Image: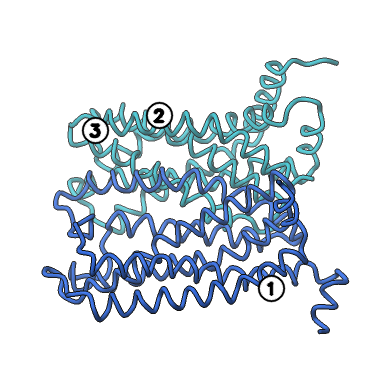
Chain colours: A blue, B cyan
Amino acid sequence: MWTWFYKLASPPYVYGVAATLTPWFLGLAAISIGYGLIGGLVLAPPDYQQGDAFRIIYVHAPSAWMSLFSYSTMAVAGAIALIWRIKMGHAVAAASAPIGASFTLLALVTGSLWGRPMWGTYWAWDPRLTSELILLFLYVGVMSLRSAFEDPARGDRAAALLAIVGVVNVPIIHYSVQWWNSLHQGATVAKLGKPAMPGSMLWPLLAMLLGFMLFYGAVLCMRLRGEVLNRERQAAWVREVVKS
Amino acid sequence: MNVGTWEALILVLRRELRLGFRRPDQLLQPLVFFLIVTTLFPLGLSLQLSLLRDVAPGVLWVAALLSSLLSLDSLFKSDADDGTLEQLALCGQGLTVIVIAKTFAHWLVTGAALVLMSPLVGTALGIPGSAFATMMLSLALGTLTLSWLGAIGAGLTVGLRRGNVLLSLIVLPLAMPLLIFGAGATDRAISGTSAAGALYFLAALCVFTCTLAPFAVTAALRITLE
């Protein structure tokens, strides 16, 4: 029953699986994102309050969701690697970090672009934006810690531990930032809470979410292959892969 | 020679405190830094106490965070450099016990000293005397939490040559809830409303880190020492 799990510890196997999965993820992501974009940008009606500006949600919300998702992937992969000493976990964590940081940056940029017409300013200390910014700092911390060690094995384990510490802290940071906002600002900023969305707006959003996850999977597989090759560059099978 | 866990804790704690007081300049430097940073703000912002009072909690807490960060470097570094840390890790006592003693000693000589000095800084920033009790309590809880968060960072970066900036990069995002609730509590105390909510939250964070962080620091040291 556990053989599939143990197989994941073998670099050539992981390399092969990632190679097989990549085109599937990419194709499905293209379909899903294609439907989401057409449905969200063209077919969905403009919001009665926000006009067409709300359409940025189709990029913003999925990337904000993915920023958290890839952080947890990184932490879980790091924990697996620390507990069962599976080195491939570190490779997954190392491959996931830059993608997650990019999603976080994308969520921040789209959020502030949306804030310009809605709030009248690019940046407001909105709790969601603020905790997203802190998440970006956490990503930067994990990535720089990994690269700071001369011995890559140590850097991997240190980064995995920091990612786990971060995962414990992310909810605390999130809720404390929300609490802080209710302390300081009387007026709540208009934000996309959970309005009853009509299906014509909601379905494209869900499709974009799924598409972003698939896209993340595809990029993760590609980066993972690079990571594995780089980490196993002394191994015989890598030489054969590179030759062929 | 058999030494119980409790005795080991006391022994390491006494060693750390003795070492700390042998180098009084290292004890004083973070405190003077704390004073200097809080002096910078009135110079840069405004001389009016009424205006200063509005920003005082934030200034006080940012300065406390920075000065606590500054002293973290010495937590494991000198012991790691001369091999004492490895000997301590091998001495048969759990590394966690030693970590607890070292971090608590670090808090006593930096955090607790900072708490005792805060009324002086508070007066200079125009914080009314009625808010001192809340301010000091929040700083006491906050600096202890911060010592633990910082110990995780210090443990992770102890083997690095230029780990100082990285240490701040790692620890500061984790410390942001402290800043929010610490400054929030002080702010409420200044305006005369009840700060109980923020203080409870600080206490919860403190208990949370004091119970879990020792294991994280131990794991970090095992990674960097091996």
Q: Chain of mark 3?
A: B
Q: Is residue B108 visible?
A: no
- Which amino acid, mark 3? Ala
Q: Position of residue A13 (x, y in %)?
A: 75, 64
CA neighbours of label 1 inside 10 A, class few (<14), some (14 to 19), many (20+): some
Q: Residue at x 88, y 71 (%)?
A: A236
Residue farthest toward the right in the current orientation of the protein: A236
> Which residue is the site of mark 2?
B203
Residue closer to the observer: A115 or B195: A115
Which is more foreground, mark 3 or mark 2? Answer: 2
CA neighbours of label 2 inside 10 A, class few (<14), some (14 to 19), many (20+): some
Same chain letter for marks 3 and 2 = yes
> Which residue is the site of mark 3?
B189
Which is more foreground, mark 2 or mark 1? Answer: 1
Residue closer to the observer: A223 or B149: A223
Q: For the residues labelled 1 and 3, say whether their Cβ atoms are less than 8 Å apart.
A: no
- Which amino acid, mark 2? Ala
Task: Judge from the rendering whether residue B104 lies leftward or rightward of residue A4; answer left or right.
Answer: left
Q: Quadrant of residue A191?
A: bottom left
Measured Cα–Cα span from mark 2 to mark 1: 46 Å
Q: Position of residue B119 (x, y in %)?
A: 34, 33
Q: Chain of mark 2?
A: B
Measured Cα–Cα span from mark 1 to mark 3: 55 Å
Measured Cα–Cα span from mark 3 to mark 2: 16 Å
